[in-house]
């Protein structure tokens, strides 16, 4: 019996581990993971080095996770099969928040239009121009980019992705995410004792009582010292009695 178990047990364990891994891979393959942007300055970058910003994702919306690294996450932003391209890039892991439920509307790519003629640039430094954009031109807006206190918009216009001065666009507002924003609760250090008003009052009372005890103690000591200093000696007492 022992020899039989010794031979069969490794095989059984191998089957169990294989099935567990297979189930895990199947679940991951059928699950689309999203991370939420709850940071007003969370940018998408063009490389994993996180050096060149593309645009800032609107607050409250999501990015689709492609791969998670130690510090960065490869993400995509935008709906597939839309009239605009999906943006792929990288973001800081610390700029993203995990969610437990899938979003109803993960992305916010909206249509905007120009109020005046301007130029669409290839780069955020506004050095490489694509073409001029006449007034009343429609385009898709992804997010903001701020450089030298100047606000730019990252847009898709006439089959080109680029930057345009936000001041030339008609006023617009990115709608708030329809998904409820639940901020993560800060972690509480279990080693730190919780201070309550009652404990504060107890501390105050203990302090006051200690002061009273110290004052009483000092008073008793002072009276004792005075008594021993001015206590009449036995000889003086006898002399007084003889005089009488």
Image (spheres, rainbow, N blue to C red):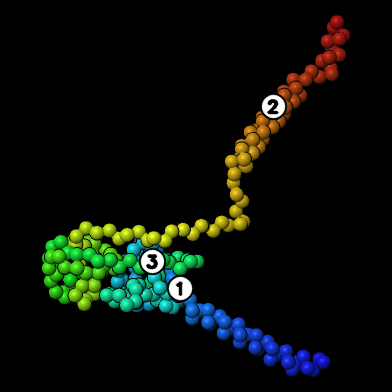
Residue 60 drawn at (x, y percent): 38, 62
Element type where label 1 sits in the image: loop
Observer-nearest residue: 42 or 22?
A: 22
Q: Earlier in the sequence, mark 2 or mark 3?
A: 3
Using the image, determine if residue 161 lies above or below residue 11: above
Q: Earlier in the sequence, mark 1 or mark 3?
A: 1
Disc on res. 108: none
Residue at position x 46%, y 58% from top? 182
How packed mark 1 is, by other alpha carbons closer than 10 Å (few <14, some 14-19, many 20 or more), is some
CA distance separating discs 2 and 3: 76 Å
Identified at 73% across, 92% down, the residue is: 8
On residue 219, the disc is 2
Viewer-closest of 160 and 137: 137
Task: Indicate the quadrant containing the N terminus: top left, top right, bottom left or bottom right.
Answer: bottom right
Residue 20, horizontal then vertical, whole percent: 60, 82
Residue visible at 61% across and 38% down?
Answer: 201
Disc 3 is placed on an element classified as loop
Q: Is residue 156 above or below residue 241?
A: below
> Mark 1 sits on what residue?
33
Query: Pointer 3: what residue?
Result: 105
């Amino acid at each position: 019996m022992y020899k039989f178990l010794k031979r069969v047990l490794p095989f059984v364990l191998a089957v169990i581990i294989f099935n567990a891994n297979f189930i895990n891979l199947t679940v991951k393959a059928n699950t689309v993971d999203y991370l939420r942007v709850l940071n007003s300055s969370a940018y998408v970058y063009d490389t994993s080095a996180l050096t060149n910003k593309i645009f800032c994702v609107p607050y409250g919306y999501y990015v689709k996770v492609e791969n998670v690294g130690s510090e960065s996450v490869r993400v995509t932003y935008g709906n597939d099969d839309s009239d605009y391209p999906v943006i792929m890039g990288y973001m800081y892991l610390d700029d993203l928040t995990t969610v437990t439920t899938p979003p109803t509307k993960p992305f916010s790519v909206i249509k905007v239009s120009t109020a005046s003629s301007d130029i669409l640039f290839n780069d955020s430094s506004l050095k490489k121009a694509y073409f001029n954009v006449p007034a009343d031109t429609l385009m898709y807006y992804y997010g903001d980019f701020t450089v030298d206190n100047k606000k730019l918009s990252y847009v898709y216009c006439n089959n080109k992705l680029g930057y345009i001065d936000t001041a030339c666009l008609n006023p617009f507002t990115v709608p708030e995410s329809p998904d409820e924003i639940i901020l993560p609760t800060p972690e509480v250090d279990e080693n730190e004792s919780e201070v309550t008003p009652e404990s504060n009052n107890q501390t105050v009372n203990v302090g006051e009582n200690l002061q009273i005890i110290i004052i009483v103690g000092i008073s008793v000591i002072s009276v004792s010292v005075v008594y021993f200093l001015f206590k009449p000696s036995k000889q003086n007492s006898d002399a007084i009695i003889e005089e009488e």
